Amino acid sequence: MTSDFFEQLGKAVGDTNVLTGDAVHADYTHDETLGLGPVVPLTVVLPGSTGEVAEVLCIATEHGVPVVVRGSGTGLSGAARPVAGAILLAFDRMNRIREIDTDNQVAVVEPGVTLEQLNGELAPYGLVYPVSPGEQSASLGGNVGTNAGGMRAVRYGVTRHHVLGLEVVLADGTVMRTGGKFVKSSTGYDLTQLLIGSEGTLAVTTEVIVKLHPRLTETATVLAPFATLPEVTKAVPRIVASGVEPTILEYADALVMSSITKAAGLDLGIPESVQQAALAYLVVVLEQSSVARLDEDVEQLGTLLGDLGALDVYVLPPHAGSSLITARERLFFVTKASGADDIIDAVIPRAAIPDYLAAVAELAASHGAFVSGCGHVGDGNVHLAVFQPDAQARHELNRAIFRTAIEAGGTISGEHGIGTSKMSYFVESADPALLSLMHAIKAAFDPGGILGPGRMPGPADHLETAHS
Ligand SMILES: Cc1cc2nc3c(=O)[nH]c(=O)nc-3n(C[C@H](O)[C@H](O)[C@H](O)COP(=O)(O)OP(=O)(O)OC[C@H]3O[C@@H](n4cnc5c(N)ncnc54)[C@H](O)[C@@H]3O)c2cc1C
């Protein structure tokens, strides 16, 4: 690349914000996807304003240099992993909360603001941004990029249910606004929704307007061990239909439960005999604005869980309850440390989960693999840790699992995204009419194809998969 290119970048964002060589910290070379090695980009560029983002994109377009956008790099699909020869556009400097508007219950934030930061600022106002992917260091820009979900989606929905408007910069440097501080609009195509989940392939987000909720102060965590996994998964639709509105409704198989409690040094006080008999657990968090309403919900849920065959029902002491949820959020790192080769997050209609998990167990056995599971069962989003070190065998197994999910009426990813790691599965299973429309949308937003090369839904010759 010519020195002119770097000079232009330096002028746009300041020389100290254009990193090359040893100045590129290892964190910038990967996201958290298992099995994808580090890639050093041509340069890491750290813009400080929307105007600077626009200038960087103009320079990239002029020189035909691809751009990979990065938030906090906690993604699980390889979408923020750099490409050699590309600019990695990182938002470490654009991390200001521009406004907390209590009357309209919205926050206006820059893309580098993290979930932890936003919720910390919102607490004194009695407000919360409830979308909660397990990693609180994730950025709002990244959440929009992946349409992040997380444990609270069963009650509150996912990122796309909370983003009211965006400011974005197109590949040619045009700054564009969508939506606003309002909750409804029937005014042309909804480009806000199109951009959410587009994984940095259509435009670069420079501002996000999000909807906020009142912070509910009373919480109870209920743990229900079951003798069999099908009993757990069959209980889920009944709990959702009961009207108790769980904030979190997770399942964990016995192995996952024992690994997370062990890793966190957590004793939940469950008798040994019950632990021995339990093959799976439901974890239900209830939240309410008053103790009386919470107690009513806990009682109703306890009775229901008993009727549904729970071996027992435990209302955990507050500290144990929050520690269990934190331990569940750290599960990814426990799974990684135990040598998992992949994590997949297909989503299916929740009533199809029992048959789906039975089919997964058979597929794992027939592919010589071990698969453990847990996840956001309330919204049909089961996370599977796949232990199969042979890349080809794992690829075949993943493919069979995704096919099973699709046949059950589901799809490949509920929240982690397609990125680079699931691209081959997506392309081979998607409706050709849908793919062709996606190509046309990509070409309309980014005719030079500089944003997120190899990511959804780039031309076939750009595909970079976990297997290459
Ligand atoms: C321990 C752990 C637990 C997790 N649990 C969950 C979970 O429960 N639910 C869930 O949904 N996810 C979960 N994740 C995945 C991850 O946290 C989410 O995908 C999150 O949305 C990524 O945010 P990020 O800021 O790290 O984005 P990155 O990984 O940096 O980027 C993600 C995508 O967004 C794009 N992007 C980033 N910023 C911008 C921008 N400004 N403009 C345009 N595109 C942009 C990137 O190009 C990339 O495509 C978990 C990850 C970990 C490590």
Image: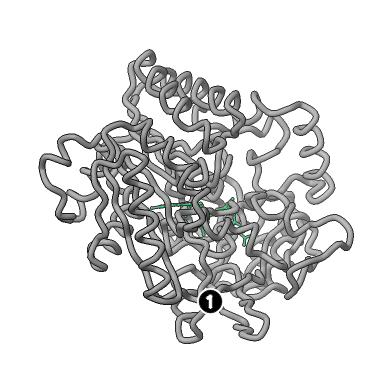
Give the image location of residue 330, x and y in percent.
Answer: 32, 53
Question: Is residue 355 left or right of 193 when viewed as pictured?
Answer: left
Picture quadrant where residue 254 is located: top left
Regarding residue 226, the answer to whether it shows in the image is yes
Residue 230 image point, x, y percent:
38, 30
Give the secondary structure at mark 1. Answer: strand
Residue 390 versus residue 208: which sits nearer the camera?
Answer: 208
Where residue 223 appears, x then y in whole percent?
29, 52
The residue nearer to you, when weighing 299 against 343, is: 299
Q: Name the residue under label 1.
A: 214
Q: How is the image coloured?
A: one colour
Give the number of callouts.
1
- Asked if residue 218 is positioned above or below residue 203 in the image, the reply reads below
Looking at the picture, which amino acid does disc 1 mark?
A: Pro
Q: Residue at x 28, y 38 (%)?
A: 226
Q: Residue at left 18%, top 55%?
A: 268
> Residue reaching furthest top?
366
Judge by depth and name the residue closer to the eye, 80 or 362.
Answer: 362
The image shows residue 172 at horizontal and vertical percentages of: 80, 58
- Which residue sits at x=34%, y=17%? 365
Under 8 Å from ligand 1: the CB of mark 1?
no
How crowded pointer 1 is (Cα within 10 Å; few <14, some 14-19, many 20+) is rated as some
Residue reaching furthest to the right = 188
Q: In this view, does 50 lie above or below 101?
A: above
Please determine whether, in this image, residue 197 is positioned above or below residue 413.
below
Q: In which quarter of the image is residue 209?
A: bottom right
Residue positioned most to the left: 272
Looking at the image, residue 354 lies above or below residue 104: above
- Asked if residue 28 can be seen in this view, the reply is no
